[in-house]
Image (cartoon, rainbow, N blue to C red):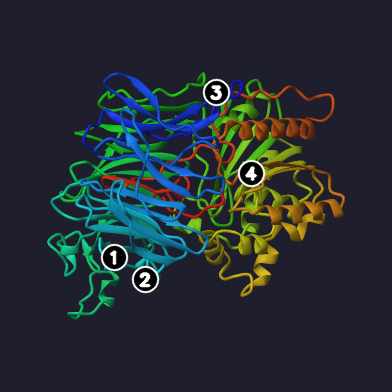
Amino acid sequence: MTGRYQVYRAALPEVCAADPARMAFTADAEGRCEVFTWDARTGRTRQVTDRPQGTFHHAIDRDGQVWWFDEDEHGAGHWRFQPFDGGDDRPGLTGPAPGEPRGLAVGDNATVAMGLGDARTTAVHIGPRGGPAREVTRVDGHVTLSGITPDGRLLAVSGAAGSARAVTVLADDGSTRAVLPGDGEHGRLWSLGFAPTGDRAELLLVREAEDRYLLASWRPDAESGGPDAGPGTASTAPATAPGTTAPAAASGITTHPWCAFDTEITARWHPDGRSVLVRQDRHGRSTLHRVDLHARTVEPVPVPRGTLLDAAPRAGTDVHYLWTDTANPPRMGSTAGTPLPPTHGIPAPVPGEHRDLWTPGPDGPVHSLLSLPEGRRGAVPAVFLVHGGPADHDRDAYDGVVHSLVASGFAVVRVNYRGSTGYGPRWRRAFGQGVGLTQVDDLAAVRADLVARGVVRADAAGLWGTSWGGYLVLLALGVRPGLWQAGVAVKPVADCAAAYRTSTPALRALDERLFGGTPDEVPERYERSSPLRYAAAVRAPLLVAAATRDAKCPPGQVRDYLAALRHARVPHESMWLETGHDGYQADDHVAVLRRAVVFLDRELRGPGRTAAPKTPRSDRSGDSGRVRTTAPAGTGTTRHDERSSHAEGHHPERPARG
């Protein structure tokens, strides 16, 4: 604890497949995020980890062994485990060099596979739990281990969803069983894990095709069409010559066009291995569907209006879910009444009036979530909270910063600008005015709409964003300096070209897709979209918070931007955190939250009208605590270790700056 503050990651507990009463979860431990166990039979918790920088990545396998990633201050380390009831820690596998976590999978026979990476490559290792590791593959760049069959004989490795090697299926000896493409006419492809039953090997997939998202699957016995390639399905298996290796390209994929969604989805296998639970992100809220792949039925699952941060099918018909809306902090539930770990509740409902706003735009209406202070009379100062990604979106979900700002008398506007997920592929691809500049136009349009409606004061509109959201704050202040009266940028991209050259391989690949090439190939595009170019035009007071060990938004390019502000005599403040991009300590989040609220209060309300900020206990972490959704797990135990967010509603391995 830090005063009234706690670190809380909105996520469901991981459940032991053989004993569903045994669970592992993360919770606050004196201001740090740590791993705990929960016994649903006794209602008892036990703290598993106690690390100075906190612990987030965790899992529990079929035998009840609790796993966590023991990382250093740079994010590199090893997986370790210990028995559910306690005991000595042991290394997950012996031998591998430290690396960044890029997936953990444990088969039913205690075969362990793990992905570990560095700035250049990713290696996948396999071996018996606690025993020596054997490297089965090493590839250039960033890939993620996304599944293992129950018998441990097949592995799934996910690359970029739009690449020629979107998913690779490997045998346990490292040989390639299939390469599943996501480029060109195939449509982007994501891997969501193998079926949890041992009677067959089936990999669950999501395919983007014709501006829809389709469930699909891969089976080794479907490489020539397979037994399920009948009416209502479409096999993409090509004819192949005996003895050739190229054929693995799309072999064995069966798509299910009868099960299509217009916005992004994620899915998890039911324990029976025949049906899946599909969660759809649509217009800032969630829907839930139970899909039987064999009976070809889609059944809506009733859920309250709002957001499901996570939903997971469990034994029998039980579904665990984590629900929230803007006025209500996240709460866990079970359709079968299974006791789940307690959450540290925040009094609900959150004060204020919460509504939707749709603003006309060139590619369709722009959707915003608007929160207004209670007792509002006329136009009020407003803070635009700008989400990161860019392939992410703001949800009708509790946010500690929204709570703090509304309780302090501000209107809060969360804009799902073009490029956001949750509105379909065309909206996500709409970058007509250029990277960043398109999104700045949408922020300006929503501001103008609210000013015209008499909701927001034209002379008191501020911006606050983290990571890619912080990038948009800096860009908006420079490109549209007359519209904004204050800005807060936390761990931002400030120089697009410099960030590209000093960031991670995954984020360099993301930039190449966004800009259409590298800074050397399309320098004018990086220059035109870079906040550094417009630093001298900034007029509004600016607070920049950056991290000294940030690999995603490196500190050097932030320092260059601050130097440009000083040279142009732009009023600004800066604060530095001794952390990386993602952190698990409350102190840093509280420091940013308090300083930002005080800064915005002073700049938007003026001297003599500054009130003490109302700062409830924050559930923020990573980017000062914006609520994030969790990624689906594969069969047995599979953990994806980018951030705890799925980018397009269905993809846990998206590289993202925020």
Write down the residue under mark 3: 350
Residue 289 location, x and y as percent?
29, 41
Whichever of callouts 4 and 3 sits on the residue coming sooner in the sequence is: 3
Labels 4, 2: front one: 4
Whichever of callouts 3 and 2 sits on the residue coming sooner in the sequence is: 2
Is residue 478 at least partly visible in the picture? yes
Residue at x 73%, y 22% (from the top left corner): 612
Q: Residue type at mark 4: give it.
A: Gly
Mark 1: secondary structure: loop
Write down the residue under mark 1: 174
Residue 105 location, x and y as percent?
31, 49
Q: Residue type at mark 3: give it.
A: Val
Near mark 1 (Cα within 10 A), the count class, few <14, some 14-19 or many ≥20, is: some
Q: Nearer the viewer, residue 50 or 398?
A: 50
Write down the residue under mark 4: 465
As drawn, 502 above or below 26: below
Mark 2: secondary structure: helix
Residue 505 location, x and y as percent?
52, 62
* Image quadrant occupied by the N terminus: top right
Q: Quadrant of residue 546?
A: top right
Check if mark 4's residue and mark 1's residue have beta carbons within 8 Å.
no
Write down the residue under mark 2: 185
